[in-house]
Amino acid sequence: MATPANSPEVEISKNVLMDIATTTLEGIEGTEIASAPLKVGEVLRNQQSARKPRALKVTREGNEVTVDIGLNVDYGLNLVKVSQHAQRAVCENIELMTGLKVRSVNVSVQGVCLPKGQAS
């Protein structure tokens, strides 16, 4: 069934794109989104909000999306494989859920940490 030419276009907010990326990354074993580096003056402002700034940025130009991610990865995991898995998963989920084209998913590993069960 074809949609009429004058049907309204649905706008997808940047927050929805960030939530899709965040949820996707939370499902990848052995990774977490790194904390974003704070600039001078942001420390006090961010103490009042419950959400910590994260190293996740979504840029949209028309129907194309670019995602920049900073990850912390558990010690012992293959950084290249984990990064590639994160890229594929974020790309596939955004394209599947929104119909937008993902231009690129840029992953930078910002830290290596002990797996949750081994931290002491």
Image (cartoon, helix red, strand yellow):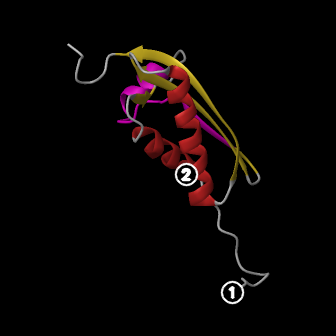
Q: Where is residue 96 in the image (x, y as percent from the top left)?
A: 59, 58
As measured in the structure, the alpha-carbon distance from the residue carrying label 2 to the one carrying label 1 is: 25 Å
Q: Which residue lies furthest to the left in this view?
A: 120
Residue under the image location 44 percent in, 20 percent down: 43
* Residue named by callout 2: 93
Asked if residue 12 shows in the view, the reply is no
**116 lies left or right of 88:** left
Q: Which residue lies furthest to the right in this view?
A: 5
Residue under the image location 75 percent in, 85 percent down: 4
Q: Which of 58 and 118 is in front in this view?
A: 118
Q: Where is residue 39 in the image (x, y as percent from the top left)?
A: 54, 17
10 lies above or below 33: below
**Residue 35 position by quadrant:** top left
Q: Which of 15 and 83 is in front in this view?
A: 83
Image quadrant in which the C terminus is located = top left
73 lies above or below 8: above
86 lies above or below 73: below
Q: Do the residues labelled 2 and 1 touch (CB within 8 Å)?
A: no
The mark that comes first in sequence, 2 or 1, is: 1
Image quadrant in which the N terminus is located = bottom right
* Residue named by callout 1: 1
Query: Magenta segment, which residues?
Result: 42-59
Q: Position of residue 105 (x, y in %)?
A: 64, 36
Q: Which amino acid does label 2 sit on?
A: Asn
Q: What residue type is labelled 1?
A: Met
